[in-house]
Image (cartoon, grey):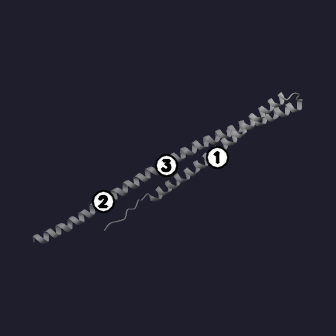
Amino acid sequence: MTQAFRFRLEPVRALSERRETEAQSALAAALADETAARARLADAEQESRAAVLGLGSCMRGGSVTGAQLRAQEAWIGRTAGRCESLALDVDRRVTESDARRGVLTEAARDHEVLERLRLKRAAEHRAEQARQEQEALDEIALGLHRRRSA
């Protein structure tokens, strides 16, 4: 009578598979956040370049009052500050993505180890079942041989 294969570490394997799936989702979210942060930084850099070009236009336009010049410089300062802030945010998000990638790598490695162990145990189980079946067939054949020779 054959017994169905039962992997005793199946709950652990299922948990590691779920951890890997969660790590994949976390990495995808981190990469999406990083991409969005990079887009915000690119927009801010474009705005900063526009502010500098605006100052050039103001200067070429002829007479510029002190208030206009201060307003233009303040705009340039705000856009530059925003760029710096967003660049730091991008760096933080890159670091977070790298950390999530590391967690995923570790989770995938753990899951792969358990999956290989499960496959190895299943192969051992099949080999043992085949051995037992062959042993039973040999007993039957030996019994038939004894009856015929008696």
**Which of the two marks, 1 or 2, is nearer to us in this view?**
1
Query: Callout 3, which amino acid?
Result: Ala
Q: Nearer the viewer, residue 53 or 12?
A: 53
Query: Callout 2, which amino acid?
Result: Glu
Q: Quadrant of the N terminus?
A: bottom left
97, above or below 76, in the image: below
CA gap between label 1 and label 2 equals 51 Å
- Residue 70 in which image quadrant: top right
Q: Which residue is tagged 1? A: 33
Q: Position of residue 60 (x, y in %)?
A: 83, 28
Residue 108 circle label: 3
Counting residues from the N terminus, which is met first, the one under dot 1 or under dot 2? 1
Q: Secondary structure at mark 3?
A: helix
Q: Nearer the viewer, residue 95 or 38?
A: 38
Residue 128 circle label: 2
CA gap between label 2 and label 3 equals 30 Å
Q: Position of residue 90 (x, y in %)?
A: 66, 40
